[in-house]
Amino acid sequence: MRARIWLLLAGALLGAACGGTEPEGSAPPPASTEARPAIAVPAAPAGTPKVVLLGDSLTAGLGLPTDESYPAVLQRRLARDGYPHVIVNAGVSGDTSAGGLRRMDWSIDADAAILIVALGGNDGLRGLAPAQLKANLAAIIEDGQRRGLTVILAGMEAPPNFGADYTTAFRQVYRDLAREYDVRLIPFLLDRVGGVAELNQPDGIHPNAEGAVILAETVWRALEPVLEESKSTP
């Protein structure tokens, strides 16, 4: 099933749908005014805790109206369940783990409380060495924890065309990081959505509105316990 998912992903996630052209191993280009979170942060009083979603086009909600992306669905869930937190959608189409690391300073402000890292799909499509993926994600996690944030890590899968050893090593990166840094792990961000035609847009990659609801549910299962823990933390 996951092989089928990546046969679909390989045709779109790295191409026009995600737009990135940065070769791995090179210095990333400077952040531009176009590389900004897909959703404006809702107005909220100073001190309102924020949940930052650092990701690529899957998080940015490419191809969907703003209010149908999975971060927007999460925002409604937070409001419905009485949590004061505000979602910051720091998803940028085409982004890699290196790009996400570069964006940390302007993606996170003083009110950030939780960081959800949802990166790696484009790294896998480019065949980035798992060791480098791990180094980039580790640096993001360390930066987040140094800022006092609770970090949640969302896993991705590598395409099968690089071989079984690469696929296994890529998957293991997320499990190892979750254990080494004691962070909550979402094993696969696209669980129950990837490769399911009726839950994706015509490109076969990016979730449609129904698929985005399922992504939000997947993320919520990891996020809700963190929110509950924060209630009992002075």
Image (cartoon, helix red, strand yellow):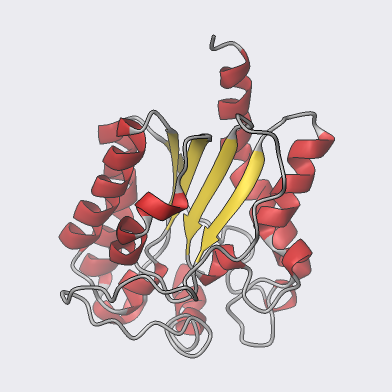
Residue 122 horizontal/vertical position (percent): 38, 73
Work out whether residue 186 can be spotted. no
Residue 97 horizontal/vertical position (percent): 32, 62
Label count reads: 0
Q: Quadrant of residue 58?
A: bottom right
Q: Residue at x 63, y 16 (%)?
A: 231
**Furthest-right residue in this view:** 80
Picture layout, residue 117 above or below residue 98: above
**Image side of residue 188 versus residue 48, left or right:** left
Q: Quadrant of residue 204?
A: bottom right
Work out whether residue 167 can be spotted. yes
Picture layout, residue 176 above or below residue 83: below
Residue 39 horizontal/vertical position (percent): 65, 61
**Furthest-front residue in this view:** 46
For the C terminus, the quadrant is top right
**Image side of residue 76 versus residue 120, left or right:** right
Q: Quadrant of residue 224?
A: top right
Q: Residue at x 31, y 56 (%)?
A: 101
Between 107 and 13, the residue placed more toward the observer is 107
Q: Residue at x 60, y 32 (%)?
A: 49
Picture layout, residue 167 above or below residue 48: below
Picture layout, residue 232 above or below residue 48: above
